[in-house]
Amino acid sequence: MRAAAHGDDALGIPPYNGGLFDPAAATLLARVRLPDTVMGEALFLLSHRPAQPASEPRPRYINYRDLSVQQLGSIYESILEYAVEPDGEGGVRPRADNSARHRSGSYYTPEDLVSLIIDRAVGPLVAERTQAFEDAVAAGQGRAALEAIDPATRLLELKFVDPAMGSGHFLVSLVDWLSDKVLTAIGDAEALAGDGYGGGTSRIGSPAKEDGREGSPSRSGRGVAPCPRPPSATRDRRRRAGRSRSWTRRNSR
């Protein structure tokens, strides 16, 4: 708990600072000391699927690293439907509690609804900025005026807050969606303004490297998501789009 909340350099664990692992929120866990044999068995059961004699004679390892935010959220939602109770033999057992999520207001938003919310809430902001640029081009404004309202740059200036971010499902989906919109805005602006227009792409730049990987969107335990910063624009828009989407998928897990 302390390592997850505050970080532990020796274990290579960064501080998460989200409150979920705050020792003050689970004082029982802060007081109890469990031997390695007990924790080892618990971790093994959490990280392996039980053996199935017919198809899987040995326990199968679960690679949590490759699970998406959406999958982890679904698992978390399922766990909320259970409580624990004494088993009468000095231990505890899980007990189905179908009203637990309703009492706590804990619900996981399905992907289709997340996409609809993003499209309806953020879509008008994208349309407003792209339309302003198109109107300026149609009015014959000069390059300096166009660069001042470059749609890709203006999209990257947006910030979004999700006060109940949970697993970050909404924000991660927003980063993916907005990355595509930024790439489209770059290409459309170049096509509308003509050859030689670089717009705000020179100011976008390449994302800073994090943990040895090509840059990733900032992640915050406070539920604030700066706009994604895709890799530098190049003349080959296909290659640029492919690199950016790969970058987004790799770092949004």
Image: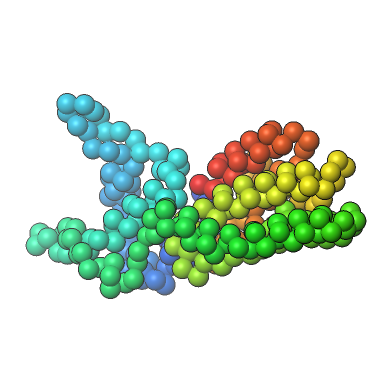
Indicate the position of residue 225 as horizontal and vertical percent values: 60, 61
Indicate the position of residue 135 as horizontal and vertical percent values: 77, 59
Query: Is 55 placed left or right of 72 in the picture?
Result: left
Nearer-the-camera pick, 104 or 135? 135
> Measuring 42% from the left and 53% from the top, which residue is drawn there?
112
Please, is residue 121 above or below residue 240 in the view? below
In this view of the protein, can residue 230 be seen by the observer?
Answer: no
Furthest-left residue in this view: 88
Query: Is 253 placed left or right of 49 in the picture?
Result: right
Indicate the position of residue 147 as horizontal and vertical percent values: 84, 56
Nearer-the-camera pick, 124 or 203? 124
In this view of the protein, can residue 56 be seen by the observer?
Answer: yes
Furthest-front residue in this view: 138
Please, is residue 169 above or below residue 57 in the view? below
> Measuring 42% from the left and 72% from the top, which residue is drawn there?
24
> Measuring 45% from the left and 42% from the top, which residue is drawn there?
65
Please, is residue 25 above or below residue 218 in the view? below
Quadrant into which the N terminus falls:
bottom left
Nearer-the-camera pick, 202 or 132? 132
